[in-house]
Every structure is written in structure tokens, then in C-alpha cells.
Amino acid sequence: MAVYTQLSAGTLGDLVAQYDVGQLVSAKGIAEGVSNSNWLIETTGAGAAGDTRFILTMYERRIDRGDLPFFLDLLDFLSARGLPVPRTIHDRTGASFRLLDGKAVALIEFLPGVSVDSPTAEQAHDLGAVLARMHLAAQGFSGTRRNDLGPATSSRVLAECGADALAAIDPALPRAIRLAREVAERWPADLPQSVIHSDLFPDNVLMLGSAVAGLIDFYFACTDAMAYDLAVTHAAWCFGEGGKDFRHDIGHALIVGYESVRPLLGPERAALPLLAQGAALRFVSSRAFDWIDTPAGAMVTRKDPMDFMARLEFYREAGDRAFA
Ligand SMILES: Nc1ncnc2c1ncn2[C@@H]1O[C@H](COP(=O)(O)OP(=O)(O)O)[C@@H](O)[C@H]1O
Ligand SMILES: N[C@@H](CCOP(=O)(O)O)C(=O)O
């Protein structure tokens, strides 16, 4: 469960009173997620929309407060353009985030839908199409943010974790140090860019039936290659337990759905096998780092870096076949 900070009912009530959303009725810590603390907030409702359910997010480690205007403005920008993205609820002064005990918090529109563990091809097709729509819409967004979790960072983080600490997690993990260096050296520099989500895992997509109802958790969004975002999504969606059992039908539907809105250029398609290896290494490195660095007492389930080592080995071996 990702609740790193405990907030009293009084503190939550005072916070909610800063917004035109009615009075606090309940606040429940949300089990999913690893990065931030999240609560499902219920209120008596107010204002034009009359919404009574919201997500309260407290930004914990990894989020630089200077990046919050980028993330929150992006939500508002995409939501205003009809993408299934939650808008930010602004407080009575118009601010999109506030400080609580020195930490930034934001109230976010609640979107309906459920995260699926095992998607259907129809869901993957719709996800691909929505991702492409998001990429095209985000090209009109004026904000930019460097990807600080790119292949060079994965390589550095793994090297800094060190072979001994990685081997203590799994004897096969130190090999990631060399593979990450090799991928970083071959990384393509000139693929078309937009603002990308870069963490579009099943738990960051809400589905209603076979349609995408919500894309959430834009806190790794950055300016980078659109095809890299597709590769991240491919790596996150197309495998079974432990990163095994590649589901070609899901990968195929995802790419066909994406190309139904935005056809890939030749160099983007050719780069997919390498981009997917970089995507796998990005999650190997952050998961290995977190495994070593999770704060004592945090209510959070650590994620296994080996699930993405398995994907990395698959993409190395399969090459273009993974994207046919
Ligand atoms: N806008 C939203 N609408 C509905 N549920 C949400 C929304 N934002 C977050 N959630 C719920 O909270 C969980 C954790 O949110 P998330 O932003 O993914 O946290 P983290 O940044 O810690 O990964 C999600 O899996 C989802 O269940
Ligand atoms: N998707 C990443 C974890 C990032 O955390 P999130 O809870 O913010 O999505 C992974 O699976 O390693």
C-alpha cells in the first residue's frame, strides 16, 4: 500500500476546505501505487460540476516540486482536449497544488474505471489509439521536461547500485549493468518527440469494458520520443507473470491501434526493439534502486526488477519479431 504519510482527519478536513468541493465525508488510503501517497476523498459536493469523489495525492520522493506545474498543467491541457485524463481541481486561490507539512498535495478529478491485469486485444487496441491521440494532442502543449530516467540514467543508476547489491537481489541481475551501458551507447537521438507518459502500465490505465476511460499518474511525463512511449507501453502490457509468456496478440493490437491514429515512421518502427530494451532497463534500474532504498516502515510493496530482466532478455532475443 502506498501511503508514506499519515494525515489526521482534522488535517484532511482543513485541506479540503481550501477547495470549492463541499465538506469532507471520508478519506481512504489507496492500496495501489508505489511513488506517492494517495487517498480517495469523498465530499458533500459543491460547485458547478458537483463532483463528490476526488483523488488526493501527496507527492513523495522522486517528484521535484519544480516539475509540478508541468505535470498538473499537462493534465488540464489534455483533459480540455477531450483526452481521458483527470483534470486538476484548483483551490479557492486558483492554485493547482498546495503545501501540507512541507509536502506538495493536489486534488485530482476522480475518473471511473478499473485497471485490468490481463488485457484483451480490444483493450490493447483502444489503448494504442488513445496513446497516439495523447501524443498528437501533447505536441500543442507548451511545457517541456527532460526525461531524467532515460538510458544514460538507467546505466548510471545500475552501476551505482553496484554488482554486489544487485547480486543480493538476484544473481542474474548484475548483467544489467553491462547491457544498460550498451543500450545507452546505441540509443537513437532523432526520433519524433512529444510529451510522453513514459509509465503507462496497466495500473495507470482505467478501463470501462473494452474502452480506455482514464490515463492517470503522469508524474514521469517528459519530452521524449513517441515511439519510446509505445515501447514502454508494449513492455508493460504484453507479458504474463514474472515478465514471461509474451502475448503477441496484445502487442500486435497495441501497435495496430496506435497506427490507426498515428502511423509510425520507418526509423521509429526500426528502433522499437532497442527502445523496448531501454524501456525494460529503465524499470530494472528503478526497481533495483527502490529495492535497496525503500524507507523502513513505508506501506508499499516492492516491485521485482527481475520481471523486467525477463522482458529485456525476450526483446534482445526476439528483435523485430516482437513487433511484427
Ligand atoms: N484520477 C483518478 N481517478 C480514479 N482513480 C485514481 C485516479 N488517480 C489515481 N487513482 C487510483 O489511485 C491509484 C494510485 O495512483 P497513482 O497515481 O498510480 O499512484 P502512484 O503515483 O503512487 O503510482 C491508482 O492505481 C488508482 O487506483
Ligand atoms: N510502473 C513502475 C513503477 C512506477 O510507479 P507508479 O506506482 O508511479 O506507477 C514499475 O512498475 O516499476
Image (tube, rainbow, N blue to C red):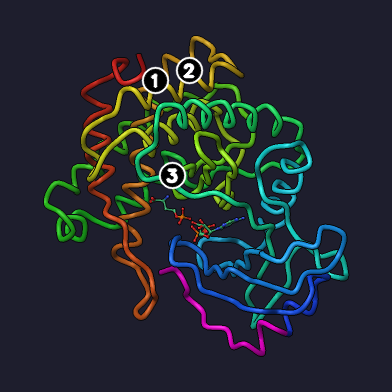
Q: Is residue 34 above or below residue 23?
A: above
Q: Is residue 10 magenta?
A: yes
Residue 36 vs residue 70, the one in the foreground: 36
Quarter of image, ligand 1: bottom right
Label 2 vs label 3: CA separation?
18 Å
Q: Tell me where residue 323 appears, x and y as whole percent.
A: 36, 18
Q: Is residue 138 above or below residue 158?
A: above
> How crowded is the residue under tag 3: few (<14 C-alpha within 10 Å), some, or many (20+)?
some
Which quadrant is home to the N terminus?
A: bottom left
Assign a secondary structure to mark 1: helix
Assign a secondary structure to mark 3: helix
Q: Residue at x 31, y 38 (%)?
A: 180
> How crowded is the residue under tag 2: few (<14 C-alpha within 10 Å), some, or many (20+)?
some
The segment highlighted magenta reads 1-13
SS majority, magenta:
loop
Judge from the rendering whether residue 194 lies leftward or rightward of residue 292; answer left or right. Answer: right
Asked if the residue under mark 1 is in contact with the one under mark 2, i.e. CB atoms within 8 Å, the reply is yes
Q: Tell me where residue 140 appears, x and y as whole percent.
A: 76, 32
Q: Amino acid at mark 2?
A: Val
Q: Tell me where residue 137 appears, x and y as whole percent.
A: 71, 31
The tag on residue 256 is 2
Q: Amino acid at mark 1?
A: His
Label 3 vs label 1: CA separation?
17 Å
The tag on residue 252 is 1
Q: Earlier in the sequence, mark 3 or mark 1?
A: 3
Residue 320 vs residue 260, the one in the foreground: 260
Judge from the rendering whether residue 170 lies leftward or rightward of residue 126; answer left or right. Answer: left
- What residue does disc 3 label? 202
Q: Is residue 128 above or below residue 71?
A: above
Which quadrant is home to the C terminus?
A: top left
> How crowded is the residue under tag 1: few (<14 C-alpha within 10 Å), some, or many (20+)?
many
